[in-house]
Image (spheres, rainbow, N blue to C red):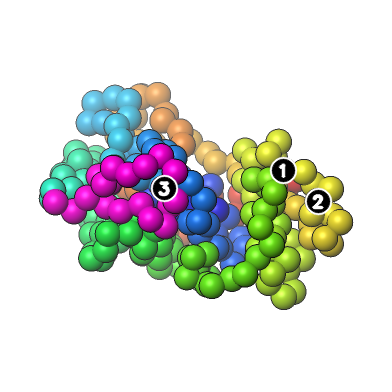
Amino acid sequence: MQPYFFPYIGYLSLIKQTDRMILLDEVQFIRHGWIERNRILKPESGWQYISVPLIKKSYTTTIKDTEINNSSDWKTKLVRQVEHYKKRAPFYRKTLAVLEDALNIETQSITELNMHVLGSVCAYLGIQANISIFSHLNMQIEPPSAPDEWALNICKNIEGVSEYWNPIGGMEFFDKSKYLSANINLVFQKNHLPAYRQLKPNAEFEAGLSIIDVMMFNSPEDINVMLDNYECL
């Protein structure tokens, strides 16, 4: 998977249910995606973005070469964006501590930041995560001839891999026959994520928000129940 910033709960479920997560950072960085930002609630209704400022580079820049613009105090701004949860979210202080720990890293690399974020969240939730960065592995894989071959060729390079898991949203992206011919079972994970009470009892539920929002309103134990509520297709 590409390295997402405080991703939605389905991403964390994928980490929990698999033996190994490799953050793919040698592909082209697409601006305004989930690598640099995510969504939390607004104080009154709807949602807003939290984001990491980046140094502008060529559109062909890879994820691994995408750098954070640390000239502004963006971390303090982000923490202030969650202050409106304080009076209504039962797990505000615990989530704030996770947020501060996740941002406690000095780096210009968006990949390294997001890996640190995932580590902090997984530690809080009690997930035994095995996460690594592809560009740090010095792995020599067969050059992919199609986008769905990145995962295939990485799996073929790792001894003992028999399955590759992907969120269900990518089902149409993959040619399953390629994986079967390599004796790798291609599994698509479909999460069943329930609505939970957010800022206002009668407000419309905002689905698919950052794990920050989930942690604000749910205990680690309840979140793990959500993480385990899935089926494989």
Q: Mark 1: which secondary structure?
A: loop
Q: In this view, does 16 lie above or below 81?
A: below
Dot 3 or dot 2, earlier in sequence? 3
Q: In this view, does 167 lie above or below 17?
A: above
Dot 1 or dot 3, earlier in sequence? 3
Q: Give the range drawn in magenta.
A: 52-71
Q: Mark 1 points at which residue?
A: 174
Mark 3, residues whose alpha carbon is within 10 Å: few (<14), some, or many (≥20)? some
The reply to whether discs 2 and 1 touch (Cβ–Cβ < 8 Å) is yes
Q: Which residue is drawn at 44% across and 51% down?
A: 62
Pick out the residue farthest to the bottom: 159
Amino acid type of disc 2? Lys
Percent x, y of residue 67? 30, 53
Out of 213 and 11, give the one closest to the viewer.
11
Amino acid type of disc 1? Phe
Residue 59 inside the magenta-drawn segment: yes
Q: Which residue is drawn at 46% across and 33% down?
A: 207
Amino acid type of disc 3? Thr
Pick out the residue farthest to the right: 181
Q: Mark 2: which secondary structure?
A: helix
Q: Name the residue under label 2.
A: 178
Percent x, y of residue 196? 44, 38
Q: In which quarter of the image is the C terminus?
A: top right
Residue 167 located left or right of residue 212: right
Residue 189 inside the magenta-drawn segment: no
- Foreground mark, 1 or 3? 3
Q: Name the residue under label 3.
A: 61
Mark 2, residues whose alpha carbon is within 10 Å: few (<14), some, or many (≥20)? some
